[in-house]
């Protein structure tokens, strides 16, 4: 007895929490999960942005709630998970997407910037995964965790000058593999997306400084990412179509990480 491919990718009846879901990649990921049938809880710090993002998804018929929280604060991470359990009843899919960066040469890099980046990009995803697993995934014997890493976590860089960011994303890569190893027996898959260059508030400065065309030319596919490019990989990791995939890091980068530049 096999399952029809549409059913394998269908998320009807499932729930998803998307951190950093108010804009950029998180909003694209939330839209993909919602369009596939999941009920969504968005979280980020700014209420106005969350309201706008939720309205954008609701217009498409996606059942969307939101809660404002700073994920770099451990107590607020727990509050997000408590809210998710109250509003959604269960969490089937957790997308650890909220992330930040800071630019400075390594020799001048401020300690508070290092801590800020690491506490959001690494510590918060550990805390969110732990809280969601304890509250919902382990008791139910199933769950999907999708971490948003970056191709910046796969290799070093001599030009980015974002030492904490690159370090944090490499940590996300091995956090993903290790958690997959520990939580596979609970029926929880843990995978990561490693996006290349996508236009967002985070990359606006780089796009202006380096130039859209230069960045596009670095990719074998000769363009940067668009508003649909993460949707397919997200749905694969979130749905029954990916039920035998865990501990994997999937670059969605137009081929940048596959070639020597
Ligand atoms: N864009 C790219 O090319 C690219 C490439 C590789 C990886 N990524 C990764 O993709 C993820 C999303 O990035 P993006 O490009 O979409 O950036 P973005 O447009 O700056 O979005 C970041 C999201 O995270 C939220 N956020 C920031 N700090 C937070 C905090 N302390 N607590 C809770 N939420 C917080 C932001 O909302 P508030 O500011 O309101 O909190 C926003 O919703 C990040 O992990 C990033 O590292 C991006």
Image (tube, rainbow, N blue to C red):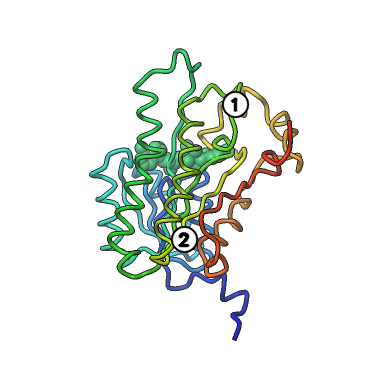
The residue positioned 48% from the left and 31% from the top of the image is 165
Please, is residue 192 above or below residue 12 in the view?
A: above
- CA distance for labels 2 and 1: 30 Å
Name which of mark 2 and mark 1 comes first in the sequence: 1
Q: Relative to the observer, which residue lies in front, 114 or 54?
A: 114
Please, is residue 248 above or below residue 218 in the view?
A: below
The residue positioned 28% from the left and 59% from the top of the image is 134
Q: Relative to the observer, which residue lies in front, 111 or 100?
A: 111
| The image quarter in which residue 32 lies | bottom right
Mark 2 crowdedness (10 Å alpha carbons): few <14, some 14-19, many ≥20: many
Mark 1 crowdedness (10 Å alpha carbons): few <14, some 14-19, many ≥20: few
Which residue is under mark 1?
A: 157
Please, is residue 150 above or below residue 93 in the view?
A: above
Left/right of residue 134 with respect to residue 13 in the rendered view: left
Check residue 72 in the rendering and tell me which mark sits there, or answer none.
none
Label 2 near ligand 1 (CB < 8 Å)? no
| Kind of element beneath mark 2 | strand
Q: Relative to the observer, which residue lies in front, 64 or 253?
A: 253
Q: Residue 200, how many percent across, how many down?
A: 54, 38
Check residue 189 in the rendering and tell me which mark sits there, or answer none.
2
Q: Residue furthest bottom?
A: 1
Left/right of residue 18 with respect to residue 219 in the rendered view: left
Q: Residue 52, how many percent across, how many down?
A: 42, 49
Q: Residue 40, how many percent across, how many down?
A: 41, 60
| Kind of element beneath mark 1 | loop
Q: Residue 253, how many percent across, how many down?
A: 65, 43
Where is the N terminus found, in terms of image quarters? bottom right
Q: Relative to the observer, which residue lies in front, 261 or 252?
A: 261
């Amino acid at each position: 007895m096999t399952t029809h491919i549409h059913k394998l990718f269908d998320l009807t009846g499932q729930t998803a929490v998307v951190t950093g879901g108010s804009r950029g990649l998180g909003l694209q990921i939330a839209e993909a999960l919602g369009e596939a049938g999941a009920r969504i809880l968005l979280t980020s710090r700014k209420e106005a942005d969350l309201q706008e993002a939720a309205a954008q998804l609701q217009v498409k018929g996606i059942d969307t709630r939101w809660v404002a929280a700073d994920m770099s604060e451990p107590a607020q991470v727990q509050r997000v998970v408590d809210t998710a359990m109250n509003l959604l009843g269960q969490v089937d899919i957790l997308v650890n997407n909220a992330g930040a960066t800071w630019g400075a040469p390594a020799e001048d890099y401020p300690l508070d910037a290092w801590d800020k980046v690491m506490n959001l990009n690494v510590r918060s995803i550990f805390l969110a995964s732990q809280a969601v697993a304890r509250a919902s995934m382990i008791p139910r014997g199933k769950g999907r965790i999708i971490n948003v890493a970056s191709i910046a976590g796969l290799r070093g860089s001599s030009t980015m000058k974002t030492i904490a960011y690159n370090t944090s994303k490499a940590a996300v890569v091995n956090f993903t593999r290790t958690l997959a190893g520990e939580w596979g027996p609970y029926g929880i898959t843990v995978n990561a997306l490693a996006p290349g260059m996508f236009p967002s508030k985070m990359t606006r400065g780089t796009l202006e400084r380096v130039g859209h065309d230069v960045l596009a030319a670095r990719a074998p596919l000769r363009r940067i990412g668009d508003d649909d490019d993460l949707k397919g990989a997200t749905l694969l990791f979130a749905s029954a179509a990916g039920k035998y995939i865990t501990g994997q890091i999937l670059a969605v980068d137009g081929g940048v990480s596959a070639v020597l530049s």
